[in-house]
Image (cartoon, helix red, strand yellow):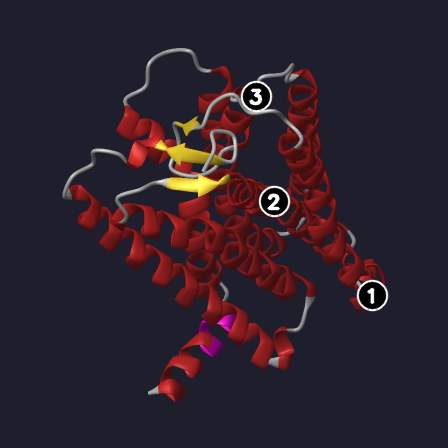
Amino acid sequence: MENGTYYTLVLFENIGYIRYALFSLGFILYCAIIFFNALVILAIFLERSLHQPMYLLITSLSFNSVFGTAAFFPRLLTDLLSDTHTISREACLLQAFVIYTYAANENTILMLMAFDRFVAICKPLQYNNIMTPRVLTVLIALSWIYPMLCIGIAAILNARMTVCGHKLFKVYCHNWEIVKLSCANNLPNNVLGFFNVTATLIMPLCFILYSYFKIIIICRRSSPEFKSKAYQTCVPHIVILLNFSIAIFCEVTLSRFVNVEVPIGLSICLSLEFIVVPPILNPLVYGFNFPDIRKQVLCIIKASR
């Protein structure tokens, strides 16, 4: 292939026999992600009593995990066993689009979950009138379509660039690394990149913080029993949110703002946390914390035996 029609993922070069250990670890992780998320999706789908807004949002979160990891792990495992680590430009842009859409989707779904908790705790008498099936369907659809549009525009701009290099110093197709290989002025891509970070990460996070601020105010005025129930439903969401926010912060900071030398192994681990840890942590946190989901999951496992 001609230079400019492909990219080379140079971090896979010269890794020796450690590739087999990394392949085994990656394969186990990917199987675990598919297994646990499929269990949660199946449990909620089969049990009609779980067809409620919070559980359907958990299902959407699990679908998103499967969606994002499908773009990352198969390619990673192939590269670990392959002697050549080139990827066509089209395939690279598609991988970047899916991975970053996954990240944006994750944040918007977490925002909807915070909104659901806000309505349930702060406006319990109006909950059924606000979180109707129709409203929930529209919100979930928007939580997928909106990030796809934002990331899709960036992907189109990247596809129109003239490329002067082909070496990507990542283990996956990274938007900013692709932009840096452009021959032309990348100011439009920079501006759009910061807009996307603001629109899909910072704004949803601000709304989540506002929601929890209002929840805390309501809980301070309520009975101990109400506080306990509210905190029990909010803690899993907070754990997931903190983990994902830290992972995204590390990825964005390392790729755009940090100029100091970071050990290559640490840099790779921090840059991959957002695509590896949340997909396996989410179903475990919600599957074990919510008794209704845990009960249905156990029934599925027993029935399969």
**Distance between the alpha carbons at the discs numbered 3 and 1:** 44 Å
Write the residue at 21% across / 45% down: 19
Which residue does the numbered mark 1 point to in the structure image?
134
Label 1 sits on what residue type? Arg
Mark sitting earlier along the chain (2/1):
2
Q: x%, y% of residue 154?
A: 67, 33
- For the residues carrying marks 3 and 1, which lies nearer the camera in this image? 3
- Pick the quarter of the image with the C terminus: bottom left
Which disc number belongs to residue 193? none
Which residue does the numbered mark 3 point to in the structure image?
182
Q: Give the range drawn in magenta.
A: 292-296
Classify 113 as above or below 248: below
Q: x%, y% of residue 240?
A: 50, 47
Instruction: Please indicate whether residue 32 sits to the left or right of residue 19 in the image.
Output: right
Query: Is label 2 in a helix, a strand or a loop?
Result: helix
**Distance between the alpha carbons at the discs numbered 2 and 3:** 22 Å
Along the line of sight, the residue nearer the viewer: 186 or 194:
186
Quadrant of residue 211 within the rendered picture: top right
Label 2 sits on what residue type? Thr
Query: Is label 3 in a helix, a strand or a loop?
Result: loop
- For the residues carrying marks 2 and 3, which lies nearer the camera in this image? 3
**Distance between the alpha carbons at the discs numbered 2 and 1:** 24 Å
Q: How crowded is mark 2: few (under 14 residues within 10 Å), some or many (20 or more)?
A: many
Quadrant of residue 24 within the rendered picture: bottom left
Q: Residues within 10 Å of mark 1 (few under 14, many from 20)?
A: few
Question: Is residue 101 shown to the viewer in this render?
Answer: yes
Which residue does the numbered mark 2 point to in the structure image?
101
Q: x%, y% of residue 173?
A: 47, 37
